Image: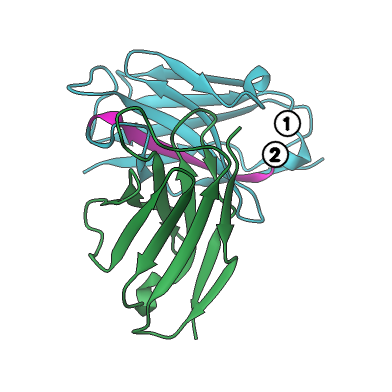
Chain colours: A green, B cyan
Amino acid sequence: DIVMTQYPVSLPVTPGEPASISCRSSQSLLHSNGNMYVDWYLQKPGQPPQLLIYLGSNRASGVPDRFSGSGSHTDFTLRISRVEAEDVGIYYCMQGQQTPYTFGQGTKLEIK
Amino acid sequence: QITLRESGPTLVKPTQTLKLTCSFSGFSLTSSTVGGVGVGWIRQSPRKALEWLALIYWDDVKSYNPSLETRLTVTKDASKKEVVLTMTDMDPVDTATYFCVRTDSGPYLHDAFDFWGQGTVVIVSS
């Protein structure tokens, strides 16, 4: 199985400041079609996870442009340009390269 | 509007079989225009770890997590818009929230889970 490792585990952020979450995979997530098969999800308190970013850098429908994804092969980053109060929750990366699909352990973003 | 809703028992005893039903609306599981539409299951442990369990696609192709494959069965009734997950030999470590999810590899080129149910809590205890 591909292991996904996220850091930090906890991320306190002041509103208006940027935030960054890292994710490392145990194998390259570069597909033969040139895309990175990594997605990012956000689970807000009391809600199911929601798709934020797919294929490494594409925002899902309705996701604000303050969210961006980047990275290649085994190292990926989710960035929030200016954190807002509604961004609190647990962020997960997930690899879609091969089954079983696997998730990182999550990064909990909280407001300072 | 796409929605998914999980239903099933909250409490099961060790060694029993769990049956969960996902009722969905707003899309079809009888055909797919481009790529592959599917419905799957993901669970979340009390410590918030996410684990992908299984998927069934519009063409009845199925995929399972190998670590649980011997215990899992996923079926669909596309006309009723339902997907059923069966998990045998339940154990306390299977205590989790079970989510029903949709995937559509058409726009995403792979299995990205763009719609989730609210989840159903399953507790395994004697």
| Apparent side of residue B85 relative to residue A86 in the rendered image (left or right) | right
- Work out how far the residue at label 2 is from the one at label 1, CA to CA, in angstroms: 6 Å
**Residue, disc 1:** B90
- Considering depth in this image, is B97 or B111 the residue closer to the camera? B111
Image quadrant containing the N terminus of chain A = top right
- Above or below for A82 versus A96: below
Circle 2 Cα neighbour tier, 10 Å, few/some/many (<14 / 14–19 / ≥20): some
Look at the magenta stretch and give its main secondary structure: strand
Visible in this render: residue B20? Answer: yes
Residue B43 among magenta residues = no
Q: How many marks can you see?
A: 2
Q: Which residues are magenta?
A: B94-106
Residue at (57, 62) in percent of width and height: A7
Residue B105 counted in the magenta span: yes
A102 on left or right of A65: right
Residue A74 position, x and y percent, is 49, 45
For the residues labelled 2 and 1, say whether their Cβ atoms are less than 8 Å apart. yes
In this rendered view, identify the residue nearer to me: A28 or B1.
A28
Seen at 78% across and 27% down, the residue is B15
- A80 lies left or right of B44: left
Q: Nearer the viewer, residue A38 or B40?
A: A38
Q: Quadrant of residue B109?
A: top left
Secondary structure at numbered mark 1: loop
Q: Amino acid type of disc 1? A: Met
Residue under label 2, please give it. B94
Residue B114 in percent (x, y) is at 33, 43
Q: Chain of mark 1?
A: B
